[in-house]
Image (cartoon, helix red, strand yellow):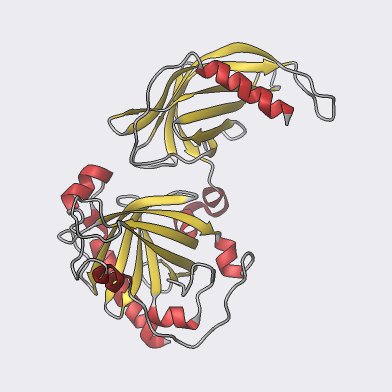
């Protein structure tokens, strides 16, 4: 662990020369490995904690030997866009070799200045300026690598824990500002003209699997809209009431909005509420049961309604929420671009439910 402590010490020395105060932003770029898919074999390890960013770039020297550069700094929020601006890069040499006793490396400024501007419309993309070049980098994504053109569909599979903010528009109806939802997508239906990921809202947050009861009362379906590069996830809340999440989906999280609507009723004139979702189980976990104990198939139980719970806690009134124009101003996309397919999805869900 001493080499990790030494690396962090280098990073802290580097950041001492950076400036800038970060503000709260409406998105959080994902930590992990980033790369340019056109330049495999090199990339960056990026760790983001609060408004602090650590970057370690793995490249090669002119002779082709592996070479690491490191830097860090404060993320600056400029007009809602997070960036690392002109951070001094350093390199460390003479440190510990594999299996050898630990020795401290020598830290030397090298590589010039680095800037990274994260894409506010996509948490998995950024622009890197360094070494006299500017290029687009992406979050290293198993789904992109493993599934190619089918990546956006496969990425949706898994279990998602969702937080709904029904208090964001300044109204005072909500007895408590946040509500939660759990969505499982465990299969892909390619039988129709619209490829859909299907699943359910499980009976509990620990179930991990969709039971017969879940499929009967709270089924779910989702699709990826290539027009606005968002995913639309629809969950049946009551027999003719649906929650549709419009989200920018990353590897581990998503954010966007939700509309509560009737069958065929999703539209730009409806009310939208901010949401954030977090992957709580993997694609393989919900498909194979590997992980927390799965649930056996069970007989249908009494359906429960999240919408009714919201109404019950707000004197029978739904919170004000956001208009489509406010969604576009805040998130930069037009929710109506997927309306036809959302309403088509509710019809397909009814057809699948009737066929069971």
- Find the residue positioned furthest to the right: 100
Q: Which one is nearer the viewer's eye here, 241 or 221? A: 241
Q: Is residue 196 above or below residue 348?
A: above
- Residue 225 visible in the current orientation: no
329 horizontally vs 81: left or right = left
- Residue 14 visible in the current orientation: yes
Image quadrant where residue 106 sits: top right
254 horizontally vs 239: left or right = right
Image quadrant where residue 267 sits: bottom left
136 horizontally vs 295: left or right = left
Horizontal and vertical percent position of residue 240: 26, 78
298 horizontally vs 177: left or right = right
Kindly identify the residue that appears in the image at 56 percent across and 20 percent down. 12
Kindly identify the residue that appears in the image at 57 percent across and 68 percent down. 287
Horizontal and vertical percent position of residue 352: 39, 81
Q: Which one is nearer the viewer's eye here, 228 or 57? A: 57
Kindly identify the residue that appears in the image at 27 percent across and 74 percent down. 241
Q: Is residue 123 above or below residue 63?
A: below
Horizontal and vertical percent position of residue 42: 60, 31
Q: Is residue 185 above or below residue 91?
A: below
Horizontal and vertical percent position of residue 164: 33, 58
Image quadrant where residue 126 sits: top left
The quarter of the picture where the C terminus appears is bottom left
The quarter of the picture where the N terminus appears is top right
């Amino acid at each position: 662990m001493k080499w990790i402590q030494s690396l962090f010490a280098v990073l802290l020395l580097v950041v001492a020369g950076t400036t800038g105060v970060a503000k709260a932003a409406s998105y959080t770029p994902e930590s992990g490995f980033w790369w340019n898919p056109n330049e495999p074999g090199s990339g960056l390890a990026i760790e983001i904690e609060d408004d602090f960013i650590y970057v370690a770039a793995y490249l090669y020297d002119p002779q082709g030997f592996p070479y690491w550069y490191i830097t860090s700094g404060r993320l600056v929020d400029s007009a809602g866009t997070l960036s690392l601006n002109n951070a001094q890069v350093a390199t460390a040499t003479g440190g510990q070799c594999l299996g050898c006793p630990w020795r401290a490396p020598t830290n030397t400024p090298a590589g010039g200045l680095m800037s990274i501007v994260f894409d506010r419309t996509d948490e998995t993309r950024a622009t890197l300026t360094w070494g006299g070049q500017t290029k687009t980098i992406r979050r290293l994504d198993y789904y992109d690598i493993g599934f190619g053109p089918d990546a956006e569909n496969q990425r949706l599979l898994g279990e998602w824990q969702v937080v709904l903010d029904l208090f964001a528009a300044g109204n005072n109806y909500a007895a408590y500002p946040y509500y939660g939802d759990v969505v499982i997508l465990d299969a892909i239906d390619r039988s129709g003209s619209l490829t859909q990921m299907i699943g359910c809202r499980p009976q509990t947050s620990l179930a991990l699997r969709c039971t017969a009861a879940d499929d009967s009362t709270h089924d779910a379906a989702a699709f990826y809209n290539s027009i606005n590069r968002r995913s639309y996830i629809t969950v049946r809340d009551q027999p003719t009431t649906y929650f549709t999440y419009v989200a920018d989906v990353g590897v581990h999280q998503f954010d966007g909005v939700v509309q509560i609507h009737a069958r065929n009723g999703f539209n730009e004139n409806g009310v939208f509420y901010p949401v954030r979702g977090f992957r709580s189980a993997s694609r393989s976990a919900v498909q194979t049961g590997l992980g927390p104990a799965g649930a056996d198939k069970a007989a249908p139980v009494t359906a429960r309604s999240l919408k009714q719970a919201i109404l019950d806690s707000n004197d029978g009134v739904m919170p004000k929420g956001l208009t489509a124009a406010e969604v576009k101003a805040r998130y930069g996309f037009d929710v109506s671009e997927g309306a036809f397919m959302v309403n088509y999805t509710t019809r397909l869900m009814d057809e699948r439910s009737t066929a069971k």
